[in-house]
Amino acid sequence: ELTTVRVQDPRVQNEGSWNSYVDYKIFLHTNSKAFTAKTSCVRRRYREFVWLRRQLQKNAGLVPVPELPGKSTFFVGGTDEFIEKRRQGLQQFLEK
């Protein structure tokens, strides 16, 4: 069985506003019989990854949960380099 997940297409929402944020397209493809849909695609923002990690930690027992890429205190997230680095970190999180 094979499952592939990709984090791609980051988009800045509410650009130029104090409440701007970046969301990412999450694409999943699998041939696993455990999934009824073999492909799915959603957009998620960083804080939803934080929520997911917390839920995994609650149920993980002694299994370590992967780290997320760091959060910026101010939205320097507008820089292309920061957005790409975070995208790569989110990709690694989901792969693990």
Image (cartoon, helix red, strand yellow):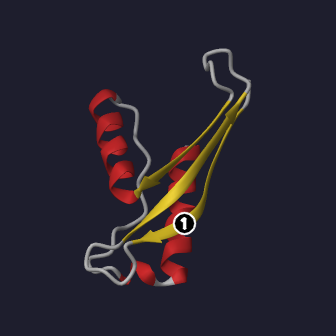
Kindly indicate the quadrant of the structure image that contains residue 55: top left
Relative to 80, is 94 above or below? above
- Seen from the viewer's position, the closer of residues 72 and 61 is 72
Q: Amino acid at mark 1?
A: Pro
Secondary element at image label 1: strand
Side of 27 where 78 appears, left or right: left
Instruction: Write the residue at 54% across / 64% down.
Output: 87
32 or 36: nearer the viewer: 36
Local packing at callout 1 (Cα closer than 10 Å; few below 14, some 14-19, many 20+) is some
Please state, as top left, top right, bottom left or bottom right, where the C terminus lies in the image.
top right
The residue shown at (40%, 42%) is 65
Q: Nearer the viewer, residue 47 or 68?
A: 47
Residue, disc 1: 10
| Residue 74 horizontal side relative to residue 89, left or right | left
The picture quadrant where one finds residue 3 is top right
The percent coordinates of residue 75 (x first, y second) are 33, 79
Q: 32 or 36, which is in the foreground?
A: 36
